[in-house]
Structure formats: C-alpha cells, structure tokens
Image: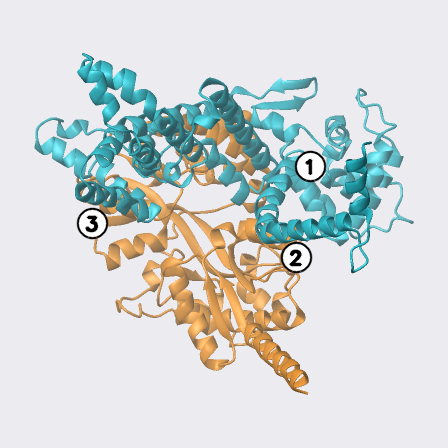
Chain colours: A cyan, B orange
Amino acid sequence: MNRAASATFHDAERAIPDGRTLKSSLRRAQRREKMKAFALIVPLLAFVLLTFVAPVANMLLRSVDNSVVPDTLPLTVQALESWDGESDQPPGEAVYAALAADLKAAVAVRRHMQLAGRLNYERTGTSSLFRKTGRRVGKWDLASDAPFAEKFEKIDEDWTDPALWRLIKTFSGAHTGGYFLNAVDMQLGEEGIELRDEDERIYLLLLERTLFMSLMITLLCLLLAYPVAWLLATSSLRASNILLILVLLPFWTSLLVRTSAWKVLLQQQGVINDVLVWAGLVADENRLALINNQTGTIIAMTHILLPFMILPLFSVMKTISPNYVRAAKSLGASDTTAFLQIYLPQTVPGIGAGSILVFILSIGYYITPELVGGTSGVFISNRIAYHISTSLNWGLAAALGVMLLLLVLVLYWAYDRIVGIDNVKLG
Amino acid sequence: MRKYSTVVGLVALLSMAGTAVAQDMTIVSWGGAYQKSQQRAYHDPYMALNPGVKIINSDSSAEAVAKLRAMNEAGNVTWDVVDAVASDAMRLCDEGLAMVLDPDEVLNPAPDGTPASVDFGDLIVSECHVPNIVYSTTVGYRTDLVGDTPPTEICALFDLETYPGKRALEKRPINNLEWALMCDGVAKEDVYDVLETEEGQDRAFAKLDTIKDHTIWYTAFADTPQLLADGEIVMGSTFNGRLFALIEEQKQPVAMLWDAQVFDLDGWIIPAGLSPERQARALDYLKFATDTQRLADQAKYIPYGPARASSAPLVSTHADLGIEMAPHMPTAPENAKNTFLFNYTWWADYRDDLDAKFQAWLAQ
C-alpha cells in the first residue's frame, strides 16, 4: 500500500465533525437514495406481484393440486397403503373403518362432495355414490356401528369394487399429473398412462386448430396492414391523420358490438350473401356459409386485431427515410428490387412486433370465437373458459392454461433465435 | 384537542359509511327481461316497504357457482341473494357454498295456511334452493318456412325432408341427447337408463349426427330468437319466455312447439358465510319475494309458471300487453301434454363424461 492511498484510506476513516466517518456517511446517503428510488417503484412492484405474478403462480399450482383427496380422506389414504393395489379383492375392514371416520368428518363440514367432484373426473358415477353415502354416514356412530365393510356394501355395491379403491389409491397424493394428462387427451388407466377413447379426444385437435387459426389471422393481418401502414406513413399529414382516425375508430368500439355486426353481415340471410345473390354471383339456394365456422372466426378476428398490426408497422415505417428507396432506384434497381431489398428489411422490426402482438392476443381469445366460431372455429381458450365458469374443473383449466403459456414462451424463444428480440420495435 | 375532534369526526363518518354500506343488498340474477320482471314484481315493492334497504342488481347468475366458489376461497362473499337454476343450487349446496333453508321455517305459508313445504311440493329439489319459477326449454319454428304442415312433435327437429333448413340447438349435451333418444324410439321413462350405457350414448350421438351439419350450435340463449327473427333457421330451442317475447311483443312469424318441452326450476339461494345481519336481511327479502302473491305477480311480466301451487289461480294478464298469461305458461294443461323433467342427479354424475364426449363429437 503506497502512502497516498493509505492517506485517503485514513481520511475516510477519520471522523468528520458529526462523529461519523466520511465513508459511512456516504454509504448512508447512497442507501437513502436507493431506498427512495425503491420506494418509488414499490407500488408498481406490489401491484404486479399481487395482480399478476401471484394469480399466475396460483394457477400453475392448481394444475397439479390434488390435496382434496389426502386432506379429506387422511385416515383412508394411510390405511390403503397396506392394501395391495394389484389384488382383485376389496381392502379389509380397517380401510372401511377409516373411510367411515373420514367421511363422517367431511360430511360435517360439507367437504365430501368436493372430493366426489374430483374423483368423478376420473370415474363417472362417483358423484352420486358419495352423495348417497354421505347422507347415511352422517348418521352413523363410529364407536358402536362397526364393522363398516358390510354397511358400505349395503349402500352401494360399488364400494366393493377394487377398481374404485385402486382409483382412490392412485389419486391419493397431494399432487397429480392427471390434469396435464387430460389436457393432452391421455389418462392414467389401470395399465398406466394411455390415450383416451377416441370419442373423448379433443384438446390436441383444438390446440392444432388454435395454432392454425392464430397463424392465419396473423398472416392476414400482416397482408392487410402492410399497405395501410405504408399509406399512413407516406401520405400528407392531413390525409394520414384522417386515415389514422379511421383505423382507431373501430378499435375504440366495443368488441361485442363489432362481433355482432359481423353476425349481421356474414350470416346466410345477411348483408354479404344478399348482395352476392342480388348480383347473381351466388345462387339463392347455395348461399355461402361465412359464419359459425372457421371462416367466421378468422374474418371477425382479423378485423378486430388489425390495429395491433397497423400501429407498430406505422411507427416503424414513419422513421424510414424515403431517400434509401430513391437512392436504390437511381442506381438502377427496379421497383420490386427496391422494395424487397431496401424497404422491406427496414420494416422487419415492425412486422415482428405486430406479428407477436397479434399472434399472442389471438391465441388467448375466446369471446369472438364463441359468438361466431360455431363448432370448427373455436379456440382452446373457449374450453378453458368453459372449465372455469361452467364445469368448475379448475385443475384442467389451469393445465390447459399452462400449456398455452408454455406454447407462447416456446414461440417467443423461437422468434428470438430466428429474428432476434432486440429487433422488435413497438414505437 | 383539535386532533381529538378530527379523530372523533372520522370515526363517526366511517361508522356512518359502514351503516350505509350495510343497507345495500346485492341480488344476483340473469339480466335481461327476466331480471326486469323480478325488479318489478319483487325488488320495487320490497324497497317500497323497506325504505332503508337498497337493492343492487348484478347479472352474474350464469357464473354463479364459479364466482361464489372464488368468493368463498377469497373469504369475501359480496352477494346476498342469488338466483340459480336447480342444478347449480345443488352443486352450491353440495360444496357448502349455499345456506341450508328449512322452507316451513323461513318461508310464508300459503294464504289458506298450507305450509310452504306442501305449497311448493316436489319442486323443492335441494335443501338450499327455494324455487320461484318453472321454465321450459322448448322449440320455436318459423311459421312461414314450414309449408302447410306445421310441426307438432319434437321429432320434427330430426326430419330434414319435411322441414329442410337450419336448426339451432344449445352447445351442450343436456336436452339434446334426451330428445335424440326419444326420437330414436326410446320411451320417455327409459331415456336415462339407456343413456347410461355406452350403446345408448352412441345411439344418441348417431341420431344427432343426422342433423349435425344442419345445426347452429349456440351458447347464448338469445341466439335462437335472433336467428329465428332473421330467418336464418327454420327451428331452434330456447326458453319459452324468450319465444313469448319474440311472438307476442315483436310479432314475428314464429310459433312454439310445446311437445317434449323440458321443465327446469329457477329460484333463490343465500350464500353461506354471510354476517348474521346480512343473512337476516337476505332471509327477510326471501320471505317476501317467495310469497304467493309475489310469485303470481312475476307472471304479469314474463310467462314462467310460479312455483307455488297457490299462486296459479292468481296469475292474471300481462302488465303491458294486456293478454291473458295463463295459456302461455309452460305448465298450462294445453302446453303440458307431453313434458320431460330434467334429471338433476343423473346429470351431476354424467355431466363431465358426456360433455367431453359431446365436445369431441362436435369438434370432429
């Protein structure tokens, strides 16, 4: 250590008038500044944590949560451990006694039907078996009414079915992959993981359709938006302002109004078909089916999502100097070459941003497809909404949601690899 | 001293705000013409009698079970009285999300003294549910699109030769599978036994296959009236009240096919876990809104049958149209020649399974 350095070091250690060292008071001041800066973002951070991160994490956990079984039937699950799942005999009296105790406690707090709902996803009929059993078990006396095996058998013979007990044993853990298996049309059968019956497979088909339709919508949006954005970017200020208002006006109109308007336009007795028939382009008995199918979904959603493509493209095109294309032409390039080699590459950041926006928005859409999609034009998100609000199978809804989330992340990663995410410009 | 008085003032203000909030009662129903009929028959007279109570309407009944479950998990139930169909009420009751109600204890007897449990009779299907109406899902058809032979029975749905054109059916297995089996030759009382078997299910789907591509599968019950009015479909299923509005209020060329109408019940539940004060107010409202006169009054605004036997003779004319309402009730003898009662407990078991099959069938 040389002298000068040690001098500064000692200066720093030296007490300043209020009794603290210079170094510590500097550190203190810096810490205060940092705290202040942090305090400024605390509300935002708390907001994001509370309204975004926590619910998403909660949803992710729901997709594997199976705690209703071990929580409702703790004694039974324990007693079942010693039962051989391979056997074709129902378990012994100890298990039935444990079940009686568990059910009696569950009935008192009305929890047994939640359990029944969970098991009914795996085995149809469990719901009424538990409802029926619950009514009787509530009246039993645990001390004096033993043995219970026969009593259960008398309520319903299903209680002696080893398959039912195997099911409870299989799904006795606090976590399950059952929802994820269901989300890819599989199930945990008697012989391990297997494909569902053909007449129950739906989610992979829906996923495929979701991807196909979202890609079509993105592509159509790009084709339609590109010339519009170019016009916006290159016309006079006055003209482009009016054009911009024309783009934004529908954007500000209610989604439901726009979707309903498409119904009026597209249906078989609707405006478009009427005009086509009047013009003699389509025979009256062969009116086009433009709605309640994939065509309807793609048309309506392309229209609804178009501004999300136009705006990023416009903001990128506005910054492109016309001199480049002019220079290319003066050097002998044809219009096509000048566009393809000079103009188009400069708009890639806008194309990327618009496409990502439109694709991600469309993959999670469900209101419009529900109204105009019929049977072939619905998205996987429609099934998620159904399981959240109607069937109440939140675990399956969460698993489907996780799949969708992973899909978007994979595509995002792919985009980053191919085009580069730094190359995206929103404005 | 000043500080002290500010605190006192704040506390007083807060407690006043507290009582103001406490007098609000949120009643959840289905929106549209139905909620309006409840507003006029129940809410308005109740608020006139109880000036301190302010009823706030919410139209979330379609998602009542999901939302109540979420509210319960969050520990903050904001609804006081909820209108729910019987199957939803049963699910809420099963999960302990609705309060158990003893009809004779919490409801008014009939004017002649008949206890409520007898007056409602077997329409009380869950111990948490007080029904207020019987409604039905039935088929409406365009009178100008069916030629000279208007349909008289449900199987017209499957008769593409006599009645060509599109149909509209709800995008769920309930009702559709039952109608398909009945039109495939299964006796009404055997429908659910047959539907329990794999072969029976295949049979129902095969029957629906014959009209699958000629059908618009809807999720919103407002779709069928709109599609009928636009001439987009020749016939379609929906609630009888919606068809009544289309025929009598909007004067569209539409008629109703009452054959094999499916009866269902709609009524009130009170969420579990309300504070004693809110619960008492909800019960007070329930007692008022389900008495004999009030149930009969609702039929002045919408053609759904009152759930009390004692209300039927009091049903009068429509408040705005002036027409006699009794012949428009699904329960009127002329309309109820062939009816079908939706089996709640059966569907509680088979809903998940058959819905998966139905959606897979639709998507293919």
Q: Is residue B243 visible?
A: yes
Q: Are marks 3 and 1 in contact (CB under 8 Å)?
A: no
Q: Compared to B108, does B252 lie above or below?
A: above
Residue A186 image position (x, y, % from top left) = 60, 22
Q: Tell me the amino acid under the disc marked 3.
A: Pro
Q: Are marks 1 and 2 in contact (CB under 8 Å)?
A: no
Q: Which mark is residue A257?
A: none
Q: Which mark is residue A65?
A: 1
Is the N terminus of chain A in the top left, top right, bottom left or bottom right quadrant? top right
SS for tag 1?
loop
Residue B28 image position (x, y, % from top left) = 49, 60
Q: Tell me the amino acid under the disc marked 2.
A: Gly
Q: Nearer the viewer, residue B184 or B7?
A: B7
Q: How many marks?
A: 3
* Residue of label 3: B253
Give the CA distance from mark 1 to mark 2: 20 Å
Q: Is residue B195 visible?
A: no
Task: Estimate how packed mark 1 is, as few (under 14), some (14 to 19) or many (20 or more) residues with alpha carbons within 10 Å.
Answer: some
Residue B199 image position (x, y, % from top left) = 52, 24
* Residue of label 2: B75
Q: Residue at x 55, y 26 (%)?
A: B198
- Residue B178 in the figure: left or right of residue A340: right
